[in-house]
Image: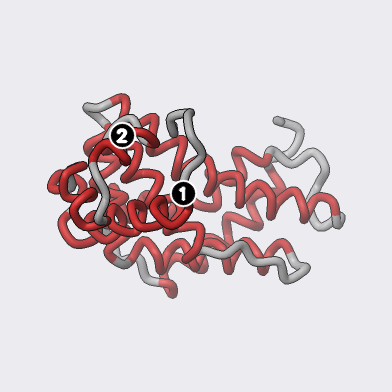
Amino acid sequence: MAKKGRPRDVTIEHSILTAAYDLLLESGFEEVTIEKIAEKAGVSKVTIYKWWPNKAAVAADSFFKGAASRLPVPDTGSVKEDILIHAMNLLLYMAGKEGKVISELIGHGQGNSTLSEVFRQYYVKPRRAEAAGILRKGIERGELSAELDVDSSIDLLYGPIFYRLLVTGEPLAEDKVRPIVLAAFEGMKYLVGRA
């Protein structure tokens, strides 16, 4: 939810987003402030507020851009392989400090609708769009049914990772989650004709 106005200076934007991302990983969302971001980035608070309406927006934006650079979208030519790589990359990402930050953002978002919406806009929607792109390529190549319910398939494939992260606390271990994602991929054939 970036504000409109003068175009951003990419170098300054990068400094702000890097500072916000680093602070999130070091201290967690609750401890991050616009003041701390400005200090670490070497900019004024006014500069930050020109481009983002609040701490939640700059934090979520930094997290999305950080995720985008750390979670490349695979394109092996096989939808099954691409989904597996994408899901396992997300799993490893969530198993690190980033998973703790995601848990915090989701937790704080339960009582803060602005944060919740910003998190969905900057982090969840882009991740879902990546997964949808992978599935649509599979449909175009004839690997998946043209009638596949893409949204429900994404829930089925990636839900187990978030369930472990947020609900059960079970380890985000590749050997535990890989078979679940593969089984979910096979189960997608039942999600046709519901789009």
- How busy is the neighbourhood of tag 1: few (under 14 within 10 Å), some, or many (20 plus)? few
Give the amino acid at mark 1: Asp
Left/right of residue 82 with respect to residue 140 in the rendered view: left
Q: Position of residue 132 (x, y in %)?
A: 65, 46
Q: Which x, y percent locates residue 133?
A: 69, 50
The residue depicted at 44 percent of the width and 45 percent of the height is 123
Residue type indicated by callout 2? Tyr
The correct choice, above or below, for 100 with respect to 126 in the image is below
Residue 56, image quadrant: top left
Which quarter of the rendered picture does the C terminus lie within? Answer: top right
**192 in relation to 160, above or below:** above
Q: Nearer the viewer, residue 111 or 147?
A: 111
Helix, strand or loop at disc 1? Answer: loop
Query: Is label 2 or label 1 in front?
Result: 1
Marks 2 and 1: CB-CB under 8 Å? Answer: no
Query: On the image, numbered disc 2 is attached to which residue?
Result: 49
Of the 4 image quadrants, the one containing the N terminus is top left
- Secondary structure of the residue carrying tag 2 is helix
Which mark, residue 106? Answer: none
Q: Is residue 128 above or below residue 98?
A: above
Which residue is identified by label 1? 9
Among all residues in the image, which is located at the extreme left? 31
Q: Is residue 35 left or right of residue 126?
A: left
Which residue appears at 35% of the width and 65% of the height? Answer: 172
Q: Residue at x 50, y 57 (%)?
A: 68
| Whole-percent x, y for residue 191 in the image | 68, 40
Q: In the image, 182: left or right of 29? A: right
167 displayed left or right of 192: left
Q: In front here: 53 or 30?
A: 53
